[in-house]
Amino acid sequence: MTSLPNSFRIRAAEFNRGRTSAFCNNFAAEVLDSIQSRHFDMPVVLRSVPGTGKTSLMQILSAHWLVEVVRRPNDYEALAQHLTDIGVLDTVGSPTVSGALVNLERDFSSILDIGAPDEAAERIFKRLVDARVLAAHVESARVMATALNDVGPDPEVSFAIPEGRPDLTAVLREMHSDDDARITSSEVLEWALGIETVVRSLLFDLSPFDWDATANYTNDFLSFRLLESASIHYDGVDSGLRVVTFLDDLHRLRPTQRRQIMGLIESRALTRGVWIAERVEVLNPEQLLGEDLGTSLPARANAERGRDVEVIDLGAGSPAAYSAYERMLRSVARKRAATDLHNFADTSTEFLQLLDEQEHPDWSSVEADVLKRLAEVDDARFDDWIRHISADALVTGKSDRERVTDARATISLIEAEQRKQQAELFLGMPLAVEELDRRLGSTVREAAQVALGREYPKQVPVYYGQRDFLLLANHNVSQLLRVGADLFDVVLTGAATARKSPAPTPREQHRTVKASSDRLWREIPARLEEGRNVQTLLTAAGKFAARMNEDRPTSYAPGISGFALTMRDLKQLIDPATRAVVPGGEELLRALADAVANDYLTKLEDAPRGARAERRVVFYINRLLCPIWNLPLGKGGYRTRSLHEVASWMKNGSASSTTDEPDEPLDEGLFND
């Protein structure tokens, strides 16, 4: 494989880190479609599976990167327009928000390992959060000053509080301010440095520490109280900027520390912009699998506008959100590949177009075999169908691939019709050609393509083209980069070997996708403590779907790629009392939770269909794992299984085979034909 640089192999938030221009240029502005202006005046929780772009989103809204857009709006027209649409920039391109990004990974959890009494550890943790937050806001305010036309060079930055707030005056005094109404940036940084010195001493100095020295620390977060009401002033003049704090990687904290920050959110004590990013893995299995995956926040009656909390999952949502996310994935892929294609492949064709450029060279042997199978159908009702579909290419105007796919789809439709007539004990009348053409839709053709790949694995590629590439991302930026890196290696290899075109052939793409899928599968035990249990569940679900698709390929094309539990069964699984009497219930609960939290299964709720229909929760297999069992990538039908049956998968590792019809697909609104 080529050793040429491959930009897909760099994590999104690390891509050209330190070079703000490169980050802004490669940022997919479409991700901002999930954000509205009101989100900057309220607490927001960004909670999703790994790899959906939480860090990159907060990064682009923070001062260091926002100022780059303000200075050079013509270089980032789409991004500047999106930022204007959500109120981060005003109509003349000036910033309205001063955002500070704080990562919660370094040093915070270690505080609980130094042997401090619980109360002292809590106070030290809160002071370190305060120090990092306020120091970040000082730096952000100074950076923002360079982008404001009405602020002079090197202004004095201060945080001013409203009159008549003795509680905030007490905060300023604890931070050693000389003024009861404001605190300067130099005073903030001096105080923050003192806190950092204490913490560094605790973490790295082996000498005894006097825990009573922390007794004068207020047992509360000072930074959030101050920023709730404070305004940023330059040379004593109010800047009018909205102050927003971005706390990244909340899941890196210890549970007690996370609860202390989430307590502010859950109590609605914060009314201004504080954003928190965390992975869904922090939720317990009951929260992950329950009715409301999006939030674990307690409901509050009569919530006042501006005082409530919003939980945003960047990788899920409404059909409109899915469409925006697809646009974002396309943008990421194009931008990642553009520079390397220009430098090494000498082509003006975009990466996504390269995936569609080459056609499979020879379908003749497969076509001959499929047409032979059609000719062996001994049923006069379908004679017109067979003659129509077997017509020469000059008559149909179809490509080789299209002819073979339609012929294989016709076989499946004939088999389905024969089962139907057999069940009705009625032979029926000959079927018109127009009826065949009506049934040969895109999903039926996709099911036929998957069947051909299963029956002729050495000759028929299944997973290729830009549509499949975007589907394989599974609404996840990290997964897009993972598959994109492998496919782009093929492109770069073609360029390095002076091939006529760097475009990968469908067969090369299919092999590459299969290899990517296999690697993801093999990594599960290393990534998860109970990864083998997750593999047991996925294997049973995958084999179950594969058998269903092989037996009934057109029952609900393009095929089954998931299973469902009724809400009643799911509640029984979540309830410890009822779960205890289900063999395999404990293992199933943990495996389902781990699979959902780590994006191996996608959990979606389907609306009940009919007055008596039960609500169901669908678990779709991650699309990058679907090639292991030769499953279709388009989310089609699913099968509702009983709790006891699915739990039994954890004991015997396989799913039972049944012949009843599949449930209707969940209309998720993304990538559907």
Image (cartoon, rainbow, N blue to C red):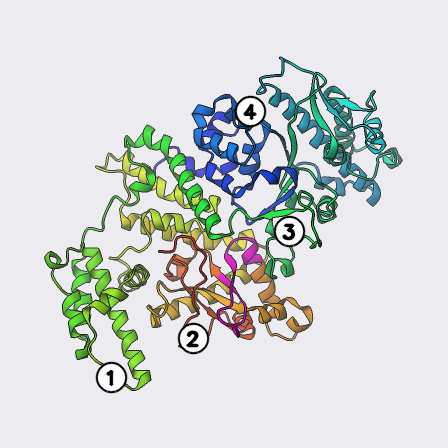
Query: Can you tell which mark lies on residue 657?
Result: 2
Residue 84 x %, y %: 52, 32
Q: Are marks 3 and 2 in contact (CB under 8 Å)?
A: no
- The amino acid type found where label 4 is placed reads Ser
Return the residue at label 1.
Answer: 427
Mark 3 or mark 1, which has the lower sequence index? 3
The relative height of residue 400 versus residue 160 in the rendered view (above or below) is below
Mark 4–mark 3 Cα distance, whole angstroms, equals 38 Å
Above-or-below relation of 304 to 603: above
Crowding near pointer 3: few (<14 within 10 Å), some, many (20+)?
some
Residue in the foreground of this view, choosing between 88 and 598: 88
Q: For marks 4 and 1, give the CA distance.
A: 74 Å
Q: Is residue 601 in the magenta section?
A: yes
Q: Amino acid at mark 2?
A: Ser
Q: Judge left or right: residue 332 versus residue 583.
A: left
Query: Marks 2 and 4: CB-CB under 8 Å?
Result: no
Query: What amino acid is at disc 3?
Result: Val
Q: Which residues are magenta?
A: 594-619
Q: Residues within 10 Å of mark 4 (few under 14, many from 20)?
A: some
What percent of the width, then of the height, locates residue 531?
Answer: 55, 58
Mark pair 2, 4: CA separation = 62 Å
Say which of marks 3 and 1 sits in front: 1
Residue where numbered disc 3 is placed: 282
**Residue receiving disc 4:** 94
Mark 1: which amino acid?
A: Leu
Which numbered disc, 1 or 2, marks the residue that appears first in the sequence?
1
Residue 117 visible somewhere in the drawing: no
